[in-house]
Amino acid sequence: MNMESDIVVGLDIGTTKIAVLVGRRTEHGKIEILGIGKAESLGVARGVVLNIDETVRAIKLAVEEASIKSGVDIKVVNVGIAGQHIKSLQHRGMKTRRSIDDEISQKDIDELIDDMYRLVMSPGEEIIHVIPQEYIIDNEVGIKNPIGMAGTRMEANFHIITGQVAAAKNIYKCVAKSGLEVADLTLEPLASADAVLSDEEKEAGVVLVDIGGGTTDVAIFHDGIIRHTAVIPFGGNIITEDIKEGCSIIKTQAELLKIKFGSALASENQENEIVSIPGLRGRPHKEISVKNLAHIIQARMEEIVEHVYYEIKNSGFEKKLVAGIVVTGGGAQLKHISQLLEYVTGMDTRVGYPNEHLATSSEEVTSPMYATGVGLVMRGLKLQQKLAIVDEKVKVKNHSEKRKGGFFDNIFNKGKQWFEEDSND
């Protein structure tokens, strides 16, 4: 039974697909994915749940498939949250300590972090993550870990990520109605970053661009710390729509065209390549030039990349990103995507595959479209470890076991009550 307790399930509620990944850590520290289940996501738009029943149906299908493939009875899941309502801000916190003789302890850090969860947000918004950037002790700046130091005035710069309570509530409802329990809620770009970025890249300065179906997530790291996050409300689905309109074909054909023949750079395609598409019932075939298809994709892709580039410039870290850009998510499978990103931003780009943390896994898991799911499993395993350590009364840096953060208290404690109210309606 011990093996069961070491198993973690990641649930990625995306705009295009709902993916469930069951994984565990091998004795070599790698992650083995025991099974994947996926279902078409019809109740989600731009990363936000719009139709609870459709989403519940899809979660159940994906869970059932993952359960059969892995042989694991799935009860608890680590869920990702995304969507255009996610915002980030920088804030400085301060605490005056009574005694200069006592060393700064984990308790002081916990209090400072917990204090950030009390910030007043706009109505309907709640804090999801509070991430310390650097500490300032008695005006001494640039301290990464102040534990053990002496000082009375303790300050820290924080990166704070907020989301809408309603959106999180709906995610919680969907999971609860699917008969599952939420272990943790993680911002999806943070999960993807865990899966595809190396520590060296985070240290040197890197931009993670996760192109999903409904949104494109951006996370900027420098000195090993996340510095900027943003969610752009465009993704692969809008490209499919453009192809559908531009070529006057139906959506399923547009999606197939994009996957099989799509390219993000028109200049890379020959003039004379033509794809023939069967006409609808009794109508003649349609001939589409691959170069024209690439023009349609490139126009929209450039717009998305411009948004990404704006976020990079906006973060103030543009000149410090030695490791360039890592692009992942389903949209990273588009041919010539890294060349287009390099062309628009002038930064080195590679496609991020979530395979370096994985033990031997099937071809399927190593696709960039599972980066978030793999990252959620990794985060779940980390959380398990942390809780095990906390149980042994060993403190963990930047982790207050007293609370998972105001967001969790508010969402999950009230969650059951909301859910029950709903059932009684």
Image: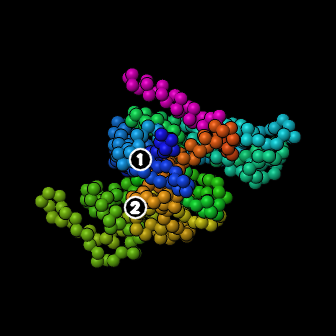
Q: Nearer the viewer, residue 293 or 15?
A: 15
Residue 249 in picture, x, y percent from top left? 25, 59
Q: CA distance from mark 2 to mark 1?
A: 16 Å
Element carrying mark 2: helix
Residue under the point 47% across and 70% down: 339
Q: Residue at x 57, y 66 (%)?
A: 324
Which corner quadrant of the image does residue 105 belong to? top right
Point out the stretch of residues depicted in magenta.
401-425
Label number found at residue 384: none
Work out which residue is located at the far top of the displayed protein and give it.
424
Residue 224 is a magenta residue: no
Q: Position of residue 273 (x, y in %)?
A: 29, 75
Q: From what the image shows, is residue 47 above or below residue 360? A: above
* Residue at far front of view: 1
Q: Which residue is mark 1?
A: 20
Dot 2 alpha-carbon crowd within 10 angstroms: few under 14, some 14 to 19, many 20 or more: few
Q: Residue at x 52, y 61 (%)?
A: 356
Q: Name the kind of residue labelled 2 in the image.
A: Glu
The answer to whether the residues at label 2 and label 1 have Cβ atoms under 8 Å apart is: no
Residue assigned mark 2: 363
